[in-house]
């Protein structure tokens, strides 16, 4: 079903009007409502995992993992802490936000919707035509938990690129948040006029494993953590690592690490969290990527994954779906030098605990990088208050 421009305007007007009720509620009341809604939604996901698997293109176990790790971050204490941080500016919430979702990571809608509602900002959401079920379930959970507050969020569906309907979506909002390709961001920017644009465009992520993480005492945990980062959402998101930089180590050189990653990590995790069906277009891109990988370096291939081990040089981005590069490096500084060509697009850098301070120092020192650091194994499970594109998650939701 697709909404026409008239229906979009009607929903936008109703959402904006409901903002008064949102702002009348206290922060604690909104936090409690959102936490209860997340708990309700998690129960509903458990009963509809098969439908969500079909809708998202992920396996049912992956859908369950994704919903669990995301929705459990929406607890009352975390919400209250986030609101306190945002409200330190003393600014009032904007009157309304329009949100345009991408379809690659279905749970990305959670932070994009929950954070503005927490701050008292009503939200009109355009879901991706590829995945409408989970945003609708989130909307319904919000409405059922508290109909008055739930009226501050609604959902519309229409094909991207429709100028009339995109204009109707944004015209009543003070700001527009866009998740998607750079082309999508540019298209919506042309409709925004003088409205604030909160752009979440194309991005990639990487991982860094220091020599400490490759020691005999820690290698098992490192392999398990990196495997989860690669497998989560079938490596379809901007927080999925496309390349893993491995510091030179006598205990475990890069090739040995890749072999263990395959045999002890990606292979067994592929049983616990199976990959979803491979789209035909991705299959063709995967075949090409793997063919070149065999020429450029060493290719380690499994039933549902592949690892290319090659020396530092330009990274050839894979089509995702558990195809990843492992690159040996001489330390944190050398890894950052290698990442410089895509510094502006880097979203997240996963790293081991012993290397994290050094990684964060480099991120702070090198102005071209806007990424944030997190522990390995947590790249696709960001906390509610994790930054986005180098800015606080509440950026654009409070009046300037």
Image (cartoon, rainbow, N blue to C red):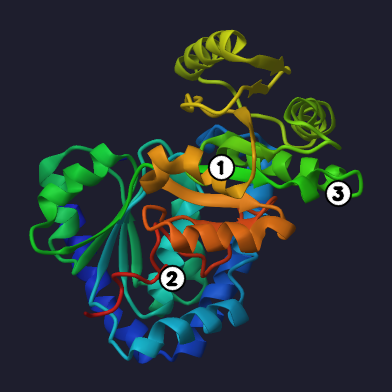
Left or right for 338, reference 160:
right
Per the image, the residue denoted by label 1 is: 335
The answer to whether residue 325 is above or below residue 282 is below
Residue 327 left/right relative to 117: right
Residue 42 visible somewhere in the drawing: no
The residue positioned 60% from the left and 28% from the top of the image is 325
User: Which label belongs to residue 115?
Assistant: 2
Left or right: 190 as drawn, with respect to 210: left
Tell me the quarter of the picture where residue 388 sits.
bottom left
Q: Name the residue under label 3.
A: 218
Residue 386, percent from left and from top: 51, 65
First along the sequence among labels 2 and 3: 2
Q: Which quadrant of the figure contains the C terminus?
A: bottom left
Q: Which is more toward the observer, 202 or 294?
A: 294
Q: Is mark 1 on a helix, strand or loop?
A: helix
Which of discs 1 and 2 lies nearer the camera? The answer is: 1
Distance from the alpha carbon under mark 2 to that under mark 3: 36 Å
């Amino acid at each position: 079903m697709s909404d026409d421009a008239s229906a979009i305007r009607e929903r936008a007007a109703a959402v904006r009007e409901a903002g008064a009720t949102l702002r009348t509620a206290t922060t604690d009341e909104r936090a409690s409502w959102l936490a209860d809604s997340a708990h309700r939604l998690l129960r509903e996901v458990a009963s509809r995992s098969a439908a969500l698997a079909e809708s998202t293109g992920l396996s049912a176990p992956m859908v369950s993992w994704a919903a669990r790790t995301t929705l459990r971050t929406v607890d009352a204490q975390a919400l209250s802490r986030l609101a306190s941080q945002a409200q330190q500016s003393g600014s009032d919430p904007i009157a309304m936000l329009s949100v345009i979702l991408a379809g690659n990571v279905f749970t990305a809608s959670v932070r994009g919707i929950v954070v503005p509602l927490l701050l008292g900002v009503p939200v009109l959401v355009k879901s991706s035509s590829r995945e409408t079920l989970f945003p609708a379930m989130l909307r319904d959970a919000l409405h059922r938990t508290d109909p008055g507050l739930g009226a501050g969020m609604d959902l519309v569906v229409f094909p991207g690129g429709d100028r009339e309907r995109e204009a109707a979506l944004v015209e009543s909002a003070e700001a527009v948040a866009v998740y998607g390709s750079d082309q999508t961001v540019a298209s919506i920017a042309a409709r925004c006029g003088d409205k604030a644009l909160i752009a979440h465009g194309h991005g990639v992520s990487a991982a860094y494993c220091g020599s400490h993480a490759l020691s005999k005492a820690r290698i098992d945990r490192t392999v398990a953590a990196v495997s989860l980062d690669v497998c989560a959402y079938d490596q379809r998101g901007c927080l999925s690592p496309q390349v893993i930089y491995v510091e030179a180590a006598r205990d475990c050189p890069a090739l040995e690490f890749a072999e263990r990653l395959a045999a002890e990590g990606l292979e067994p995790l592929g049983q616990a969290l199976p990959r979803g069906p491979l789209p035909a277009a991705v299959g063709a891109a995967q075949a090409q990527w793997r063919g070149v990988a065999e020429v450029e370096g060493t290719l380690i291939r499994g039933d549902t994954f592949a690892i290319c081990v090659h020396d530092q040089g330009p990274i050839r981005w894979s089509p995702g779906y558990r195809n990843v590069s492992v690159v040996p490096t001489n330390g944190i500084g050398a890894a950052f030098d290698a990442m410089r060509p895509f510094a502006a697009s880097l979203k997240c850098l996963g790293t081991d605990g012993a290397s994290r301070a050094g990684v964060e120092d480099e991120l702070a020192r090198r102005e071209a990088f806007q990424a944030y650091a997190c522990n390995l194994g947590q790249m696709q499970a960001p906390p509610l208050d994790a930054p986005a594109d180098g800015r606080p998650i509440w950026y654009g939701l409070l009046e300037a």
